Amino acid sequence: MPRRAQHSKENLVELALGQFWTAGYFASSMDDLVKSTGVSRYGIYSAFGGKDELFLACFEIYQKTVVTPAFAQVEALGADLDAVRRYFECQIQRASEVGLPGPGCFVANSTTEVAPVMPEAKAMVEAHNTRLKSGFTNALNNSGTGDAKVVHALADVMVVFTNGFWATSRVTNDAETLRSCVEDFLNMIEEAAK
């Protein structure tokens, strides 16, 4: 009689996310995943088929548990550049609670490590960046910028800044430096949007 699984797929993904997020895809061996999740190799393969599929499942749980709660305020009707400030502050506080330097952004990390060699990860990174751009476009439009071409260009720059910002959070232990970068950047965006 087969043994019943002692874990749910969602719990397995949440635990694997922690491993991949801090160590990265390539540095996380199956042994590391077994240790970090408490699930046997057989259990991981039975639930997901392998490391790649488990890694890709982490994108969904990351969107659900990290991105959506933080970014929802930028996506909200009537959001403006102050909502963008609150988004960054929310994430800076989260990183500070974990301890800086922190793990950065799981998606931003995956952009440079995995997306170039895994088409499915690249598609998920592109979907994430499209979501960021849409939220930033919303905030810019609600901040009084009427020129669609300017809004498009600024939203693109904001996505690039955001990805670079989370990379920077992996090497700084000073939350005030991060806050200062956000404030300087958004002041420049506000000036450019006039």
Image: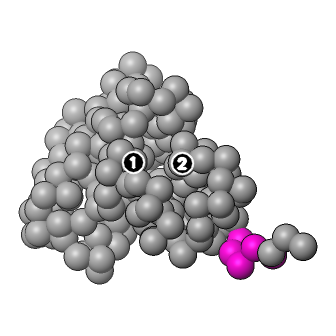
Q: Which mark is residue 51?
A: 2
Query: How far apart are labels 1 and 2 at the CA level?
Result: 9 Å
Q: Is residue 171 above or below residue 117?
A: below
Q: SS for tag 1?
A: loop
> Is residue 83 visible from the viewing direction of this image?
no
Closer to the camera in the image, 96 or 153: 96
Closer to the camera in the image, 154 or 104: 104
Please state the horizontal and vertical placement of residue 99, each as a whole percent of the image. Answer: 23, 76
Which residue is located at x 80 percent, y 75 percent?
3
Label 1 close to label 2 by CB (< 8 Å): yes
Please state the horizontal and vertical placement of residue 54, each as a whole percent of the image. Answer: 58, 51
Quarter placement of the N terminus = bottom right
Quarter placement of the C terminus = top left
Q: Which portion, as a residue range, is magenta?
A: 4-8
Magenta stretch prevailing secondary structure: loop
Closer to the camera in the image, 63 or 14: 14
Please state the horizontal and vertical placement of residue 114, each as a whole percent of the image. Answer: 39, 36
